[in-house]
Image (cartoon, grey):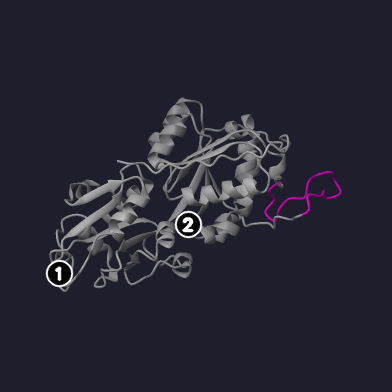
Amino acid sequence: MPIGKARRALGLLLALTIFAAACGGDDAARVTTIATTTSVAADTPQADSGSGDPVMDSRGLPPVDPLSVSGDIAVAGSSTVFPLAEAMAARFEDEGYSGLITVDSIGSGAGFERFCVAGESDVSNASRPIKDSEVESCRAIGREPIEFRVGTDALAVTVSPGNAFVTDLSVEELAVLFSTATTWQDVRAEFPANPIQRFIPGTDSGTFDYFVEEVFHEDEGPILAAGNTQLSEDDNVLVQGISGDGCDPSNASTTCAVGFFGFAYYEENRDRLSVIDIEGVEPTTEAVNANTYPLARPMYMYSTASIIAEKPQVGAFLSFVLQFVNEEIGEVGYFPAPEDVLNRAAEELNAAL
C-alpha cells in the first residue's frame, strides 16, 4: 500500500543555537500529558522582567527566537497530524530557523515504531494515545515518552458529490456500512441499491484505530473482513478513490464510494467531496467544542525529556508549536484543544525543558 510521505527541508544558515534547554527533573517512568498553550503574538518583545529572567508568554513558556535555532529535527507519524506539523515547521522556517527539519507522514503506528523501536525520530505525531506496548518499546531503548496534545480532529465520513441520497448516518449504520453491507440499500432500505466501494486508512493509521474503537468497539475483524475495501496510509489515495467513483443513484450499476479520514483532508478537498453528518451532527467548530460530534478526537506529538536535553532545537520547536499552534490550527482545518487542558500545559512543558 502506498505511504504518503512528505519532507520539508528548512535551511537559511542564519544563526547559532542559543535556545537553552535542560531536563527539568528525572525522566521518570511514566507518560506525562502536555496539552497545547494558547498563542502569543509573533512580535512579543523578548525583554526581561527586571529580574534578569526572560518575559514568559501568557502561560509561562519561555520565548523562542527561530533565528537563534539550528540543528536537525526529525518528525514522523500520523497522516492526520501531518498537515498541522507541516504548517508549524513552515512557520518555524519562515521566522528564521536555520536547521533541517523533516516531517514524514507514515501513520501513527509506523511513527511510534520509528520513535520507540528504531529510535530514529525526535518527535512522533499521533492521532491516538500511545499504547502500553509502545511505551514499553520506548523504554527498552531508554526513551520515556511525553505526550503533547496539539489540537482536536473531527473524523470526516465522506462520499462523492454524485451521492446525494446520504446526508446523515447513525453510528450503528456506520458499522453496517463498513462491514457487511454490499449495497447502500443494505444500510437503509430507502437508499438505492448501488454497490458500495470502501476507502479506508491502513491498519498502521491512528485514524483506523480510532474508527474501530468508536464504531466497532475495538473489534477490527468486521471492517477488515468487508469486501470491496481499499486500505491506504495515503489519504490522497482515499480522496481520489471516493471523489472519482462515478456514482449515479439513478443507475444501480454504478458504484457509490465512501471513506473516512481526518477533517483537514475533507476541508482541503471539499469541492470534490461531501461530508456526512453523524447522529444528526455536522462536524463543525461549535459541535467539536460542545463535544456533540461523535467522531472528534485529540491529536498528539510525543518526545522525551532526554531528547530535548540532547537536542535543544527539539525543545525550541515544541515550545514554538505550543505557543503558536492556535494561530495556525484553524487554517489547517482542525480545532484547538479545550481551554482547561491548555491551562495545564506550561508547567509540565517547562519541567521537561
Query: Are dots 2 and 1 in contact, CB under 8 Å?
Result: no
Is 326 in front, or is 142? Answer: 326
Instruction: Provide residue 278's location: percent of width, then percent of height.
Output: 32, 67
User: As rendered, which of 203 and 149 lies closer to the eye?
Assistant: 203
**Residue 284 locus on image (x, y percent):** 44, 68
Q: How many marks?
A: 2
Which residue appears farthest toward the top when viewing the image?
A: 141
Residue 11, can we see it? yes
C-alpha gap between disc 2 and disc 1: 39 Å
In percent of the image, x 57 and y 57: which residue is there? Answer: 328
Q: Is 205 located above or below residue 174 in the figure?
A: above
Residue designated by label 2:
152
- Under mark 1, the amino acid is Asn
Question: In the figure, residue 177 lies in which quadrant?
Answer: bottom left
Q: Nearer the viewer, mark 2 or mark 1?
A: 1
Amino acid identity at mark 2: Thr
Segment colored magenta = 45-62
Q: Name the residue furthest right.
A: 50
Q: Residue at x 33, y 50 (%)?
A: 237
135 shown above or below 147: above
Left or right: where 22 falls relative to 300: right
Magenta stretch prevailing secondary structure = loop
Q: Which residue is mark 1?
A: 251
